[in-house]
Amino acid sequence: NDGGDEGISIADNGDVTVGSLITNNISPAGTLTIDAAADDIKFVRSGDLFGLFNSESTGSTTSLTIFEEGGGGSGSADFCKILVEEHGATTISTVDDASNLAHLKFVADGYVNIASSSFMPITLDAGTDIKLDAAGGEIYFKVSNTTFGEFSTAGSYSSLILYEDGGASAD
């Protein structure tokens, strides 16, 4: 099939090349591969850009950007972006173009575990306060799973306990 004026061609191996595609369904029997000649794969609904995969031609970074609903023909200035750089360095960022309300929330049905590789720190860097809100009433400080301090509340009573010798005793 030479595709004629439709801009569609099918190679002998079954690969389909499409110049322009308007359809309600794509249902491949196997793997669906999208190979764009340019750096971007755009997701558009009714003229509104709502998602974008981007891979730099140098191959050093790849990103997925999800735009706010109703962003207009060129996409919204409000978005969430996942950027993967060399060595797998990953940044998740949010942008609210008109304000600073692009909050990032993690809502898990189970627990959230943030782990860093050996000898790498975890840094919390806030523009204002850092809030720890434990519904159980206790916040523990540990090194190598040994408790060296805790904040505790019970009713109207609050305490801060620091353990001597890295958790050896409460003296």
Image (spheres, rainbow, N blue to C red):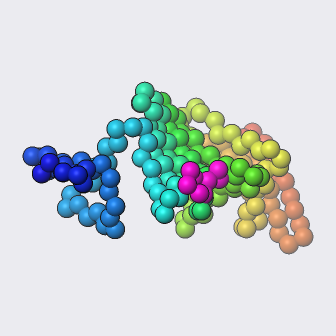
Q: Can residue 28 be seen at all in this image of the molecule?
A: yes
Q: Name above or below for residue 34 compared with residue 107.
A: above
Residue furthest out toward the right: 156
Magenta stretch: residue 40 in it?
no
The quarter holding residue 115 reads top right
Task: Report the span colored magenta.
Answer: 71-78
Query: Foreground: 35 or 115?
Result: 35
Q: Residue at x 65, y 58 (%)?
A: 105
Q: Position of residue 1 (x, y in %)?
A: 12, 51
The quarter holding residue 168 reads top right
Residue furthest out toward the bottom: 155
Q: State the predominant SS element of the stretch in magenta.
A: loop
Q: Position of residue 15 (x, y in %)?
A: 18, 48
Q: Name above or below for residue 61 compared with residue 149.
A: above
Q: Can residue 88 be seen at all in this image of the molecule?
A: no
Q: Position of residue 68 (x, y in %)?
A: 60, 58
Q: Name above or below for residue 113 compared with residue 70.
A: above
Q: Residue at x 45, y 46 (%)?
A: 53
Query: Foreground: 128 or 75?
Result: 75
Q: Name above or below for residue 101 compared with residue 60.
A: below
Query: Foreground: 84 or 109?
Result: 84
Q: Residue at x 62, y 46 (%)?
A: 93
Q: Residue at x 32, y 57 (%)?
A: 21
The quarter holding residue 32 reads bottom left
Residue furthest out toward the front: 5
